[in-house]
Amino acid sequence: MGIAEMIETIVKIGFIIGLTIGFFAPMLAWVERKQSAVMQDRIGANRADFFGFTVIGLLHSLADAIKLIFKEDFIPRGAERALHTLAPVIAVIPSLIAFAVIPFGGKYTLWGHEVNLVIADLDVGVLYVFAISSLATYGVVIAGWASNNNWSLLGGLRASAQMFSYEVAMGLTVIGLIMFYQSLSMVDIVAKQDNFFHWGIIWHWPAFVLFLACAVAENKRVPFDAPEAEAELVAGYFTEYSGMKFVMFWTAEFIEMVTIAGLCVALFFGGHHVPFITDAELAGGFSFLGPNVSNLVAMLIGVGVFIFKLVALLILQMTIRWTMPRFRYDQIMKLGWKMILPLSLTWIFIVGVGILTGVMPSP
């Protein structure tokens, strides 16, 4: 790897970390409070201020961060200290590095150097996402067991059963997309959605509904938050966590929301593509600026479009979170194994028939 490629990779990694941890994680903590307040006809967080300026409650995320940084790191008596400390790390890292194969833009030639806006362009990008995301299960299980708390252990067992169950169904929901685009590469799948009528949501909207349901269940968010049901398990697997370790579990949920939104954008909503405008046409619209600047403008527009779609899907996830009641644990298991799994298999059959008969032509 040359110096230019190394600098490009470092910049892309910094961009993703800044976007997820630096921007979306604190913003989603604010949205969690403010959107619920708006939907429930309340004011919401508005007390934290800076010289009298509350900034519509945005300073609460900063106040929370400062408070939790200096909060005592408590480990209960009888807990497995090493694993208790390691569990939050195992939970947060997979949600972050899964974003490595999600393209947030296309390929552009700038001043003789080709820029590919994805950290790792893997031929098996889809498999990589599922392999990495499954590792987060270990963090949850270890947290529940190492805490030496019955409620934490029960929450960890619930979480592991739920996450393993929905991983199976979630993997099957994208098989139809893989058959349709004939590739496991996230970059190839996004590139083949250059035409709006080849977007995944156009041909595979049932798969999108199933995939989003499975992804929310994987993230253990409402209505699938039985592993941390407050009325039953206090706080579930992270009951015995405080300070920065608690923040890591909290941050992992928000980063997973961003990763879920990124996957949906890449698989179903055309990635960085503008509807009805190809990348070549977008760059050609600024050709009067010269080839390098026109490609740079097209790249910035593409990244902006990707972030816009990302925000829209994050708002959708938050809306689901504050709209639906929590499912019972037996209902969660029944939904995964007896409804979503058979529907996923049925959709694979439908896509296969559609491709063979030419009704669903591959792009």
Image (cartoon, rainbow, N blue to C red):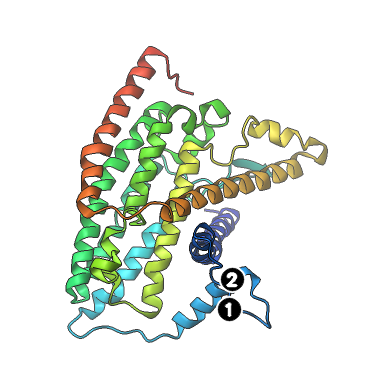
Report the amino acid beneath label 1: Ala
Kindly identify which numbered label has been placed on residue 13.
none
Q: Position of residue 115 (x, y in %)?
A: 60, 46
Going by the image, does 7 lie left or right of 167?
right
Numbered disc 2: secondary structure: helix
Tag 2–tag 1 contact (CB < 8 Å): yes
The part of the image, by quadrant, that contains residue 244 is: bottom left
Label 2 Cα crowd, 10 Å radius (few <14 / some 14-19 / many 20+): many
Residue at the front extreme of this rendering: 41
Taking the image as drawn, is residue 99 in sight? no
Q: Position of residue 321 (x, y in %)?
A: 42, 55
> Which residue matches tag 2?
57
Residue at the top extreme of this rendering: 357
Q: Earlier in the sequence, mark 2 or mark 1?
A: 1
Label 1 Cα crowd, 10 Å radius (few <14 / some 14-19 / many 20+): some
Spatial distance from mark 2 to mark 1, Cα to Cα?
7 Å
Going by the image, does 172 lie left or right of 50?
left
Numbered disc 1: secondary structure: loop
Taking the image as drawn, is residue 65 in sight? yes
Which residue does the image show at 60% across and 48% down from the upper left? 308
Report the amino acid beneath label 2: Gly
> Which residue matches tag 1?
48
Judging depth in this view, the residue of 216 and 262 nearest the camera is 216
Which residue does the image show at 37% across and 74% down from the upper left? 246
Q: Is residue 269 above or below residue 115?
A: above
The part of the image, by quadrant, that contains residue 158 is: bottom left
The part of the image, by quadrant, that contains residue 273 is: top right
